[in-house]
Image (cartoon, grey):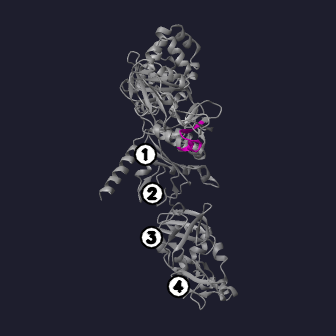
Amino acid sequence: MKPLTLQALAVTLIATVIAAKSPYQSVLQHSRIRGRQHGPNVCAMQRIQGTDKKYFTNCKQWYHRKICGKPTVVTYECCPGYEKVIGEKGCPAALPLVNIYNTLGVVGATTTKMYSERASLQKEIEGPGSFTFFSPSNEAWAALPTEILDALVSNVNIELLNVLHYHMVNKRLTSEDLKHGSSFPSMYQDFDVHIQHYSNGIVTVNCARLVKTDQHATNGIVHVVDRVITAITNNVNSFLDTDEELESLQTAIAAAGLTGMLESEGSYTIFAPTNEAFKKIPQEMLDRILGDPVALKDLLNYHILKNLHCSESIVSGTPLETLQGTVLEVGCDGQEITLNGKTIVTEKDKLGTNGVVHYINELLIPDSVKTLKELAEGAPQVSTATKLFLDAGLGPQLTGSNAMTLLAPLNDAFKGWKQSFLLMRNHILKNKFSSKSLYHGQELETLGGNKLRVFVFRNNLCIENACIAAHDKNGRYATMFIVDKVLAPPMGTIMDVLKADSRFSTLVDNIQKAGLTELLNKKGTYTVFAPTNDAFRTMPPADLNKLTNPKELIKLLKYHIGDEFLISGAVTSHTRVKPLSGDKLELGMRNSTMYVNRVPVVDGDMMATNGVVHAVGSIIKPLRKLTPFLQLTSSLKILKGNAYFKIKGILVMTFSHYISDELFQKVVSSRSSKTMSPVQ
């Protein structure tokens, strides 16, 4: 028992260590695993084609071979802290442990090494101590604007030294110590450097990505970063207030009462619309939002993420939650950040003490600030319905501030639709609803004065014959449901529906002869598969003669009446309904057509107050009962639906196959069947 306990403890400790790995270490480990075929301490790297940007690879990137939507080339390099040895495979040798100054040269940060010498920092980083140096790469120095670099180099003893000291922390910090959201006082006037350690393994300091991490030295550690960082002293609100390009945003923030929040402690990401972005919005819409405190606050909160996201943290599309409560799809396309699929970010990574600002040239308009008309116009899949609503004179309702719900059918729903657009009033409900609050049997009142019923099925939520086809769009005052069909309110009982359609005159006569009129007029939830006149006309004479017998007529008619309510939206691949007589009816959907016992429905979802009518072009017959392929005979033995027999001494098991009686008899009498020997 004791060894087992120790073993269990060891497993627990190992699991704890693995679980405690930082995201960066997990990605590094994945890269090690992918590179181990090339020798010890080899890491697989993914370089974006056409650039020098390289990443340790995670599982998703490895299989997609893409970063920010761009194809990558896999290279194999020494993992951090190791180097190659001539004549040996992989990277077996640990890098020599030298001081920080010399380590800068070892890791290729030669420009930082040169500037450290010029700024008289060399002696400090060669001497005793325990420092962390976030060293800009050579490319990072080269990317600085010429005027800034010239100013630094011309005043090396003050400006350049201050910049280098801001890249240093007076203690050793490994990647494990660089926790998400942490900050550390730099060696330049104790101004903090801000760390973000993202779940995808990206680590940033002041939004500069660590590209070479954990390069140990005798007196500290070096992390190479991809840009030169500058001191952060102001919060994001102060930053926004100082830029004339953001004047419209500043005014809106003050009007919405968000100034205090943006001055307080936090970790925000602000997608800041420029003055140009505000000008792109129709003036009428902009004036309405600016004059509505609730809508304005929602609009601005939709531009603010709950967490700080530097541009370097985005390597693929991901939904990120906003302060408004919904999500933005934040992704990237090469070097560009995308928002909801659009490349509208013009400037990135303007860092404050409590967040980061990215400039955008287009305003992001959430559904929660829109009128019904704006919701509908923003959904091209319901453009036909939008036009019909306006043609029906419903523009004031779609732009007003009354609480209501719009049922907008998809464009395809209007194919072959010939009814009056005035019926579109039935697609607007009084009061604002959420689909999640609707319940089975609920009645909803329309602007046209009709009552609509709610039906909850296993696979669909429907209002009369129309099922909700997309998530709710919640506007400022109203909600829009996108539905799959043009709505058909009930126009009477089932008998009323049948009598009003000349295609069912024969059926109506037969219903009256059978004495079923009262049944189809009374309250209930019936599904009637109504044979058309052509269906009766094409019946075989023998079957047609049977209908002169009242019992046979009643039996046939009741077989076409289901004792539950099923519209086409409730039917899946295998749906059964019990008719008033006979066995269950087998329903299914194929290519958007409903079938009942393999008979296609030619016109469905004719709504009635006590059920629904589906027209069929043929009389529905019970499905033929299937016969087991193998039955108990002198040549074989059936065991619980399986047949066991020998063919030339080989044991064979045949599972239950089904064919017709005629074919079965042919198989049984065949030469092959007679040669089979049963298993005793």
Q: Is residue 344 magenta?
A: no
Q: Residue at x 59, y 19 (%)?
A: 142
Dot 2 corresponds to which residue?
Answer: 454
Q: Is residue 79 above or below residue 224?
A: below
Q: Is residue 62 above or below residue 453?
A: above
Camera-near label (1 vs 4) is 1
Camera-near label (3 vs 1) is 1
* Residue 651 coordinates in the image, percent (x, y): 59, 81
The amino acid pointed to by label 1 is Lys
Q: Sequence-wise, which precedes: disc 3 or disc 4? A: 3
- Badge 2 crowding class, 10 Å Cα cut-off, few under 14, some 14 to 19, many 20 or more, is some
Dot 1 corresponds to which residue?
Answer: 432
Picture quadrant of residue 107: top right
Distance from Cα at disc 2 to Cα at disc 4: 37 Å
Secondary structure of the residue carrying numbered label 4: helix
* Residue 287 coordinates in the image, percent (x, y): 49, 27
Distance from Cα at disc 2 to Cα at disc 3: 20 Å
Secondary structure of the residue carrying numbered label 2: strand
- Looking at the rendered structure, which numbered label has been put on residue 551? 4
- Looking at the rendered structure, which numbered label has been put on residue 497? none
- Looking at the rendered structure, which numbered label has been put on residue 522? 3
Distance from Cα at disc 1 to Cα at disc 4: 51 Å
- Badge 3 crowding class, 10 Å Cα cut-off, few under 14, some 14 to 19, many 20 or more, is few
Q: Residue at x 46, y 20 (%)?
A: 167
Q: Which portion, as a residue range, is magenta?
A: 33-46
Q: Sequence-wise, which precedes: disc 1 or disc 4? A: 1
Camera-near label (2 vs 3) is 2
Task: Choose between 271 and 496: the one closer to the eye.
Answer: 271
The amino acid pointed to by label 3 is Lys
Q: Sequence-wise, which precedes: disc 2 or disc 3? A: 2
